[in-house]
Amino acid sequence: MTLATLLHPGRQARFAVIAAAIGLTTGSFLVGAGLTPLWLGSVTGFAVAGVPWLLKWRSDLKSWGFAVTLLGVLVVLQGVHSLEHLVQLAQLYVLQWPLQRSLGLITSANVEWVHLAWNLVVLAGVIYLMTRGFRNVWMWALLVWAGLHTLEHAYLFARYLQVAREINGFGLPSFGASQSLPGVLGRDGWLSQQSWCGRIAGITTAPRAVIHFGWNAGEAALLLVAARSNLPRFSNITPSPTTPRGGNA
Amino acid sequence: MRAAALILMLAGLVTGGASTPGDPLVTAAPSAVVPAQFAWGYNASEATCEGSFVRHKLDFKTVTRGPEVTYYDSNGAGVAAADLDRDGDLDLVFANLEGPNTVAWNQGGMQFKMQRLDHGRSRGVAVLDADGNGRLDLVFTQGLGSLSRFELMDLNADGGGRFERRTLPGVLTPAYAMAWTDIDGDGDLDLATASYDTLLSKAQGPGFLSGAGAGVMLYENVDGRFHGTKLADSSQALAVTFFDVNHDGLPDLLVGNDFEVPDDAFINPGETAGVWERLDALPTITQNTMGFDVADFDGDGRLDLFATDMKPPTFTEPERVAAWMPLLQRGYEQSRVSDQQVAENVMLLNRGDRFENVAYARGIDATGWSWSGLAGDLNHDGFQDLYVVNGMVAKEAFGHLPDYALVEPNHAFEGGAGGFTARNEWGLAATDSGRGMILADIDSDGDLDVVINNLNAPAVVFENRLCHQGESIQVTLKDPTNANADAFGSVVRLHSGDRQWVRRHDATRGYLSGYNGPLHVGVPNDAAADGLTLDVVWPDGAISASEVPQGANVVTVSRAAGGGAP
């Protein structure tokens, strides 16, 4: 088992290309024609493009078991999630959109819910993989990274709920800006406002969008490295429905 | 007044050259040496050391119309400090909205005798001799009208003064903010004004724009008459100042606009008949500019700029963040990362050929709904400290808060080599909704006190009782050879070895506030021991210089006839 095998759509390759094209076209049409908001058009496009991947992962599940398949799913979806953040940076810095519009693709549905939920999924997946034998220094690094990232989102989510409650107390409607507040790291973040902490380039100065692209790009990179360093242990396993579930190497 | 013994130690006619030429301070003109009399003295008054400021409430309050504060009464008014009665201590002049403008005559010991003037509905205030006749004027901006000028004719036996209303010939346009300096080096005071059009619009309806008056005006003083040139047809100015934005050594005009209207910089052409052209020269500027202060924050001898704006001082406390949410939402909907304007304080350090905004890096970007923000060495350690007053009351903006008031403490920062440190322990964290503010030595003990004109709350003086880390030198400038007798626009530079402390003499500072008193320079003890030299760069670029006699801490520098810029 190699990283390339894990990430290649295999027999679904041609279908994957076609589905991606259809998904992109469909999503673009829906959004461009004003039929759906950006997040719904994006979800529709991803749903179409994701069908061959679902077929591949169903096949992987039979061949390699749940743990290896989960690893593949996490790597691909975290890559897509990082792409989401890259799109947000492009919206901010290339397209020069206002902050309110620069929310990536799916994220515009709800910033804090989407990101906390996804980070919890990744963290749980990493923990599961480690219980199934995927343990080396890269997995531990990934666990720490994903844990800290989830903590940051937990802080953001908790503060979002607190601010929303205060706003309700004032008798005001909800504000989109309450989902764009700084977190622990970054410009105006919790760390930057601690008297014992000076300004640390990037860590307490980068805008929220850059900080979270960094979190996710780092997480995607660690997932790749962790996958690459763990998968060779499955190289002597012949793909078959009888492969031990979880790849208890 | 605190017992202050002023002992003249030395008075000399200095004709020597500047000791450290080469660094352009304010003028592009070749520096000429002019004679001046440096009357050095020693103020023996001891400043009290208690580690904090002590609050004194004054019998004055800026009041608004009606039971509810609305736009733009919410913007409050300014305060000025000057020695009106020439008794050696600084008196105060408060602008008011619904109540009368008031002079607080300084009786010493933090006691003031209040004189209510028959005049109000004012915004900014400055004290200066506008026509060079030797008598000080109180000049108010009215917001809805042009400037009002009251000349101090003489002093009453009971301690007050007799003021007579005078015109400023040629000054007719509505003005909210003003700045005075000698822009052309001809020896008299010129004037710049700018209007706050939204205030005019609210009062007069949208049709006001079709009439004359709104916008940015530059008035050149020609033989006592002001010749106006309109630089901009409209403005939303809360502040104007003269500041060299293109590094050519000449004072340009900087107009600080509210409501996301970009600030305007008009470049001094350097010649009388030249045209003041707009130049977009600053890399970053405040989005809703409230006030300006020009000072050398990093001790490199170049003048930097501090501008105030609105930004929550914390994002970690949900209830405080929620109070700001309507305003944050506006920025969220409109702001782009590439915007030149940012909704936070800006400190532009002058790097010689460019400016760099270091406000966030130095931790002074967020001070609440900020109005006046001023630099001054409050603890005599040789570094500029910073004080910013804030607060907002307006039904339109904060209808969701009790009494429509955003209540947040003022912010004091101690300057240092590495930046600024918040100093809540200094006792300056008042929550009285301050607007105009000035730093001045009210008790004549050699350190800077703080005077604040609050909105719908008594004005206060915070008496400086910090434990100082050095001494101070206070420099009074006089130019009896010119109509600009108080030498506004001059720059003083005190230096010792490779260290220097630069101050500019501005008639208006911060938000709607004025100052006409000695320039205060804090000097650390080791620098004082090393020997000091004082340079004065007069508005025409001419320079006078003198060594500082050992132990001297006050000086009056009087320009003598002769010499001058070529």
Image (cartoon, coloured by chain):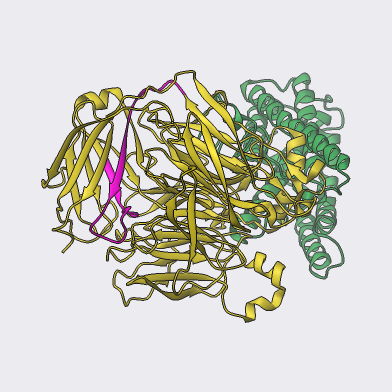
Q: Quadrant of residue B485?
A: bottom left
What residue span does the magenta drawing correspond to?
A: B466-493
Q: Nearer the viewer, residue B431 or A116?
A: B431
Residue B325: where, in percent of width, then height? 75, 46
| Residue positioned 56% across, 23% down in the render | B425
Q: Is residue B236 above or below residue B401?
A: below
B489 falls in the magenta region? yes
In-image side of A97 versus B545 (left or right): right
Q: Quadrant of residue B236?
A: bottom right
Q: Is residue B362 visible?
A: no
Q: Is residue B56 above or below residue B148?
A: above
Q: In the rendered picture, chain A carries what hue?
A: green
Q: Quadrant of the N terminus of chain B?
A: top left
Q: Quadrant of the C terminus of chain B?
A: bottom left
Q: In the rendered picture, chain B carries what hue?
A: yellow
Residue B21: where, in percent of width, then height? 18, 48
Q: Is residue B508 above or below residue B280?
A: above
Of all residues, the one furthest to the front in this rendering is B157
In-image side of A162 versus A208 (left or right): right
In-image side of B73 versus B337 (left or right): right
